[in-house]
Image (cartoon, rainbow, N blue to C red):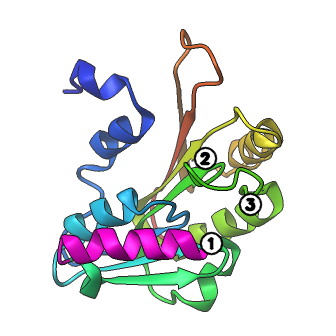
Amino acid sequence: MIKAKYLTKVTDLNKVLLEDVINEGDTVIDATMGNGYDTKYLAQKVGESGKVYSFDVQEEAIKSTKKRLEKEDLLDRTNLILDGHENIDMYVNCEVSCVLFNLGYLPRAKHQVITKPNTTLEAIKKSLKLLKAHGVISIAIYTGHEGGMDECDAVFDFVSSLNQSEFNVLNCNFINQVNHPPRLVLIEKKKEY
């Protein structure tokens, strides 16, 4: 059952929805590292025998995340990668149970550095190929910045076209919040195809 407190932030709701998707020993991807909160969450979920690949194009994201992981003694189960998520396939060559995206910009950093539709779609396509059966790609889409709605539209156009016999696609969004509330899209791979 989803508790009311989980309906205030898309990131909290996301963790509830992913609770049974990520297991100890899994390999997972944080496609947009940011300040490392999702990387930390994933590292805790996969346990000592699991692996987290975490991507960002900004060195400050790597530094902030590394510090957070060291504090929690989780660094050994992560691979922090200074590269764009569109290059996921250059670093990950095994099946993954989950890929997390938080689209937009790094909070408390330069808002000029944002995720872009072309690289995001490339990363999503490559993530679909890495996803194991019943694995999930989670995409939190923030639209309150310049280019945000363009990226949202591109993601929605793409995921809406996914074959329903291969994937389930869920759209969650707050309908009574102002100021561009984030949207959450989950893609589940149904089975091997």
Quarter occupied by the C terminus: bottom right
Residue ID for mark 3 = 121
Relative to 51, is 155 above or below? above
The magenta segment: 58-73
Q: Amino acid at mark 1?
A: Gln
N-term mark: 3 or 1: 1
Relative to 190, is 68 above or below? below
Q: Secondary structure at mark 1?
A: loop
Is residue 193 at least partly visible in the picture?
no
Q: Position of residue 128 (x, y in %)?
A: 58, 67
- Tell me if residue 146 is in the magenta stretch: no
Q: Amino acid at mark 3?
A: Leu
Quarter occupied by the N terminus: top left
**Residue at image point 33% right, 73% down:** 67
Residue ID for mark 1 = 58
Q: Quadrant of residue 11?
A: top left
Residue ID for mark 2 = 164
The Cα–Cα distance between marks 2 and 1, rounded to whole angstroms, is: 36 Å
